[in-house]
Amino acid sequence: MTQARILVAEDERIVGFDLCETVQEAGFEVAGPHTDISSAMLSFQKNKPDLAILDVQLDDGIVYPLAQKLRDEDVPIIFHSGQFTRDEVKERFPEATTLLKPCPPNEMLRTVVKILEDQ
């Protein structure tokens, strides 16, 4: 059985590395952390992830164009934000999950596992 691949896009370096470490220690393959849309988009184009964890605001702008491409490819998304509310994100991506920062690692992992199991 192959490991699920999780794309992580987070512009706060410490938060990004913590997220990646948490997900990797749980047995998933990690792509990231990507601090900008450009590098996350390139990673997605090279190897489609099974799930993406996206901060809404990255170094080079709002992540919605990447999120749209992921949605078009049926990749589930967890938005992880401290600046945008669930309602703001749900307005554009009603099917996505939103976790507000700070999010405890065990809550993030529970959400990742549940989404992957539901696919």
Image (cartoon, rainbow, N blue to C red):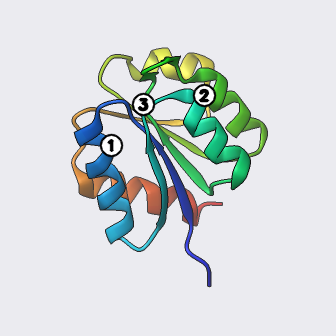
Question: Between 45 and 85, which is closer to the camera in this rendering?
Answer: 45
Looking at the rendering, in which quadrant would you find the C terminus? Answer: bottom right
The residue carrying mark 1 is 16
Question: Between 21 and 52, which is closer to the camera in this rendering?
Answer: 21
Per the image, label 2 sits on a secondary structure element best described as loop
Which residue is located at x 62 percent, y 46 percent? 43
Which residue is located at x 37 percent, y 61 percent? 23
- Sequence order check, earlier mark of 1 and 3: 1
Query: In the orientation shown, which residue stands out farthest toward the right?
Result: 72
Where residue 41 is drawn, which disc sits there? none
Q: Nearer the viewer, mark 2 or mark 1?
A: 1
Real-space CA distance between mark 2 and mark 3, rounded to the nearest whole angstrom: 16 Å
Q: Position of residue 37 (x, y in %)?
A: 55, 28
Which residue is located at x 72 percent, y 33 percent? 69
The residue carrying mark 2 is 94
Query: In the orientation shown, which residue stands out farthest toward the bottom?
Result: 1
Which residue is located at x 38 percent, y 17 percent? 84
The residue carrying mark 3 is 55
- Neighbours of disc 3 within 10 Å: few (<14), some (14-19), many (20+): many
